[in-house]
Amino acid sequence: MLRAQKSKTELTATGLRFGIAAARYNPELADALVNNCLAALEEAGADLRRCRVIRVPGTFEVTVGAAKLAQSGRYDCVIGLGVVLQGETSHAEHIAGAVAHGLTDISILTGVPTVFGIVTANTIRQARVRCLGKTYNRGREAARTAIEMARTWTNL
């Protein structure tokens, strides 16, 4: 009989390499996501010289950038960062859904874990809280998730 093992994934980024595909659209928020993500990676021991950030026009294009990074074989985990704001149409739902599916597909097809660091918000105020917030910050959360996923994969 197999027993579930308690696992304690070490949240240290020392020795790990991260690729980040980030949207440029909504620069105040997108730049904050990138900066907070990089800060969290560095605080956890990542050497930022071994990390690469590529900027793409918008959140929809994050998947193409993430795919290129994952296919390179240079990174232990790839992080997608961007912001999708709800407007008067269903456009935001289509974009967020496409990116979520795309990032999942990249993980499955390349074997490189990818992280969905996309902020989806109804208002600019909500987005600011998630991108610039002190108690919750999606950039930092994406970094922590990436570290955990990279550690899990390197320990298999």
Image (spheres, grey):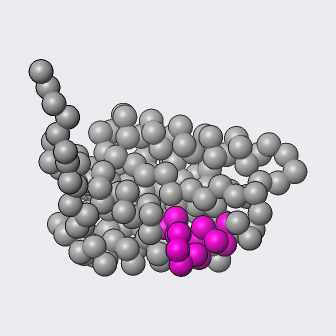
Q: Main secondary structure of the magenta part?
A: helix
Quadrant for the C terminus in the image:
top left
Q: Is residue 144 above or below residue 151?
A: below
Q: Is residue 102 above or below residue 144?
A: above
Give 4 or 19, whichever is nearer the viewer: 4
Residue 48 seen in this snapshot: no
* Relative to 91, 65 lies left or right: left
Q: How many marks?
A: 0
Give 57 or 94, whichever is nearer the viewer: 94
Residue 52 seen in this snapshot: yes
The residue depicted at 85 percent of the width and 46 percent of the height is: 89
Residue 40 at x, y percent in the picture? 37, 74
The quadrant holding residue 14 is bottom left
The quadrant holding residue 104 is top left
Give 23 or 101, whichever is nearer the viewer: 101
Residue 142 at x, y percent in the picture? 44, 61
The residue depicted at 49 percent of the width and 51 percent of the height is: 116
The quadrant holding residue 59 is bottom right
The residue depicted at 33 percent of the width and 71 percent of the height is: 41
* Relative to 87, 119 lies left or right: left
Residue 72 at x, y percent in the picture? 31, 50
Magenta-span inclusion, residue 129: yes
Residue at the farthest right position: 88
Magenta-span inclusion, residue 134: yes
* Relative to 93, 105 lies left or right: left
Quadrant for the N terminus in the image:
top left
Stretch of the chain drawn in magenta: 127-139
The residue depicted at 65 percent of the width and 77 percent of the height is: 28
Residue at the farthest left position: 1
* Relative to 72, 26 lies left or right: right
